Image: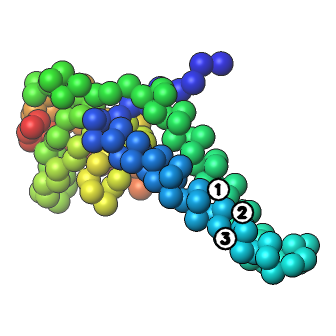
Amino acid sequence: MADKVTILTVAGLKKLEDELENLRSVKRQEVAERIKVAISYGDISENSEYDDAKNEQAFVEGRIIELEKMIRTAKIIDDAAISKEVVTLGSKVVVEDMEFNEKETYVVVGTTEADPTENRISNESPVGAAILGQKVGAEVNVPTPAGGLLYRIVAIE
């Protein structure tokens, strides 16, 4: 089965590459040192420091594999291809909540880079999916468990 494509911006790819480099060059050595110290305490059958270090080692190695796969399957969003006419991946979009007359600015990104605290929403999120392919002035209904929300696209930057 083919690997799932990871959609990233250039900055998102750089962030993943930096994390991978840190895990390979720094974190691996730190964990190896913790294991070495824990082994020096003697019997490892009931050694919680050893168990913790081995668990962290498994997590680090798993994350390294995950990052390598994401980087290998990365599809980079071309900044030059981002349309100002319709909402696409990489678009910075100003939307207005029609019920409360509040404006919010979002950047539509792939799921790997989504971070709601920084207003970076996934193309697979309810809002992201609803606004993709829409033009300025379009009104979209976003389904939520509490009922639909109506947004109007004010600007695409």
Q: Which mark is residue 124?
A: none
The 10 Å Cα crowd at callout 3, few under 14, some 14 to 19, many 20 or more, is some
One can see residue 36 in this view:
yes
Real-space CA distance between mark 1 and mark 2, rounded to the nearest whole angstrom: 6 Å
Which residue is painted at 80% across and 72% down in the image?
39
Q: Which numbered disc flags the more N-terminal residue, 1 or 3?
A: 3
Q: Pointer 2: what residue?
A: 55
The x and y percentages for residue 112 are 42, 42
Q: Are marks 1 and 2 in contact (CB under 8 Å)?
A: yes
Asked if marks 3 and 2 touch (Cβ < 8 Å), the reply is no
- Considering only vertical position in the picture, is 81 above or below 99? above
Name the amino acid, label 3.
Answer: Arg
Reading the image, the residue beneath label 3 is 34
Asked which secondary structure carries label 3, the reply is helix
Q: Residues within 10 Å of mark 2 (few under 14, many from 20)?
A: few
Helix, strand or loop status at disc 2: helix
Q: Quickly name the residue at label 1.
A: 59
Q: Kindly identify the amino acid type of the residue bearing the numbered disc 2.
A: Asn
